[in-house]
Amino acid sequence: MSSRETPKTVPSTSQSREIFCQALLDQMTLREKVGQMVQADLSWKQDVKQLLREGRIGALLSIREPQVINEHQHIAVEESRLHIPVLMGNDIIHGYRSIFPIPLALASTWNPELIEAVARVTTAEALATGTTWNYTPMVDVSRDPRWGRIAESGGEDAFLNSAIAQAWVRGIQNYRDAEGRRVASCVKHYAAYGASESGKDYNSTDLSERRLREEYLPPYKAAVDAGVMTLMTSFNDLNGVPATANTLLLQQILRREWGFNGVIVSDYDSIGELINHGFARDHKEAALRSILAGVDIDMMGNAYHFHLAELVEEGKVPLELIDAAVLRILELKYDLNLFSAPYIDEGKISSALLRPETLDLAEKSAAESMVLLKNEFSLLPLKAAGKKIALIGPLAEERQSLMGCWCFDGQAQDVETLHEALQRNLPNNELSVTPGCSINGNETDFSEAINAALQADVVILAIGEADTMSGEAHSRAHLGLPGSQQALVDAVLATHKPIIAAVFAGRPLAITKLAQQVPALLMVWHGGTRTAQAFCDILLGKVNPSGKLSASFPRSVGQIPVYYAHKSTGRPIESTGTLQFNQAHKSSYLDESNAPLFPFGYGLSYSEFTYSHLKVLTPKVSRSGSLKVSATVTNTGKVAGTEIVQLYVRDLVGVVTRPVKELKGFKRITLAPGESTDIEFDLPAAKLTFLDLELKPILEAGEYKVWIAPNSAEGLEGQFELE
Ligand code: GLC
């Protein structure tokens, strides 16, 4: 059958989704039903092709070659009894072949419209190459930069992660190709995986149900409210119960409270891992616990494949549970138009990849994600004319690392190095390039770098992490510059040349010394295929940086977790403290500040934005009303720029203790030099709801503070009363 012909089981247009899927389910044997609940990749020990013919695999995973995807889909559709196409799962979390900034960097744009556009174009590449199920968005609230997967997240805040979650779901699921096919989004990792103890991946999470519901669950709920079609359970055990068998999470909250009726997939053998958790004696018990908790598909595990049918036959698992799960899976495949168009047109692939407009968006989003952390003497943008430039650092000639973690289909050959981009953008400048050291080595001789710096008028440092230092299973206990990079910086600093530090990383770093040493510091992250040109755009002022941090930077690992929405405590640092033993005792360290190195929401611009004239237009807010507050923002700088204006509130007294600040809104504004604008926020009182002692939503009258601010550490402060 050609890749264009339709398969034998095709819903006739007259048949509704429900009738078609139910009719199909009614024809299925128990073995075929269980088959729909099994996902494998080609590393499986069993004969995948034969299992497809027998209808015993319903989804495949991580197949890189489109031709191989088509080959297996033909077998599933043409050679099985019921011709049910398979779902093709993949992790395209920041690009397929055109790679975009890592999600933590994209979050620093605070630009949901941009993220939705990124999601759309990455879906176009993904669908053209055979992916119909994308395990994105990852919106695990992350407050521990030791955790390698913070790179994949939207950072520390539930509100910002929620906006990001909805942007990804819309961008992915609203896209359709010429055949009307679409890709299912998959919100992950449910739940609270970002709270992994000590920042170690896969570690236990233990937090109150209050913290879980108020600080970690909102982004997943936002995805559900945006219509996400699937959800992935997480590896971690949560309060003693592994998420992959957690009925509070999967039944009570997800199905009953949120009304989610999509497909739930485990993470990679996370059902089988119930044995390692000590939560199941064997695979059969693991299968039992997960199916009873509500997991529909076993990703890459043997539990459902080998034991589910037997558990039904033994009466331990009601057939109704299996039927409900399989119906959800069939309906998902129907909604993706897989029954009518299961194959990809291999002739269209090359024209779908690396399209100029896609790469332009990659460049734009990389530039918008970069965060200017310091810029003394307006060293940036660089007045490059006639200057000798020394590019120094182990990231100067890197390609792969610029793409970051989780980009299997991105190719280093597509990535320009920083050296190449600088050469191309500054053809008339004398430019030297010196690695100075390796990314993670222990070099001590920096003479070559020192000489290069001495010969130059300005130094650009290309330093930070390799792509392999963040992402899954790549946590770090030390968060300074890796290897001997700080020693390299010290050596180059001794030349007293002006230094611009470009830091590449997949996480916030504890770069306190570097931040003190250099006059200009730009967080480049791992910005994808077009990182280098985006860096040059900012370096030379073609783009005015607008990024703001979505996760706090710690001064030291000892502070972790350090985040803005913390509680006040009974002895807050800003108080006089409690006099004990003739000393004021406060919640602080002997040897470290409480403040982060750079706070949530922080980022500089080549413009100067001043905030003035805060007006609380509704000093008394009724429970059914809205808080209206405005301020004037002025660009007192010399260049046009974009500012992300943030709205924070604080509930001063509650039936439970409340955070000292909570992000409740943000707006992006662009102002010409000298231009002012009045920003108004209209916050419905209902958005001030929190959970009372019984974890029931409460809207509590009382005094509140409100800020309109450039970041979480400063801003114009006002008061209002909720009646
Ligand atoms: C991995 C990750 C998950 C990913 C899945 C499929 O272990 O935890 O984020 O989507 O397996 O690759």
Image (tube, rainbow, N blue to C red):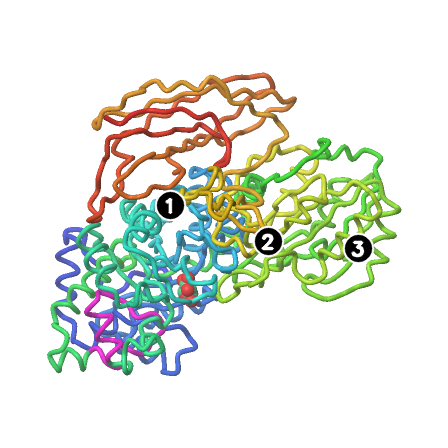
Judge the density around disc 2: few (<14), some (14-19), many (≥20) Cα neighbours within 10 Å.
many
**Is 15 situated above or below 326?**
above
> Which residue is disc 1 drawn over?
158
Count of numbered labels shown in the rendering: 3
Is residue 359 visible to the viewer in this orientation of the structure? no
| Quarter of the figure that contains the N terminus | bottom left
Q: Disc 3, disc 2: CB below 8 Å? A: no
Query: Earlier along the polypeptide chain: callout 3 or callout 2?
Result: 3
Q: Is residue 535 left or right of residue 240?
A: right
Kind of residue at badge 1 = Ala
**Is 476 situated above or below 213?**
below
Q: Provide residue 297's location: percent of width, then percent of height.
A: 28, 67
Residue labelled 3 has its Cβ within 8 Å of some atom of ligand 1: no
Front one among 155 and 409: 155
Within the magenta stretch, is there residue 657? Answer: no
Q: In what element is the residue under mark 3? A: strand
Residue labelled 1 has its Cβ within 8 Å of some atom of ligand 1: no
Mark toward the viewer: 3 or 1: 1
Spatial distance from mark 3 to mark 2, Cα to Cα? Answer: 20 Å
> Residue shown at 63%/56% (left/top)?
480
Spatial distance from mark 3 to mark 1, Cα to Cα? Answer: 42 Å
Residue 434 image label: 3
Query: Earlier along the polypeptide chain: callout 2 or callout 1?
Result: 1
Q: In what element is the residue under mark 1? A: helix
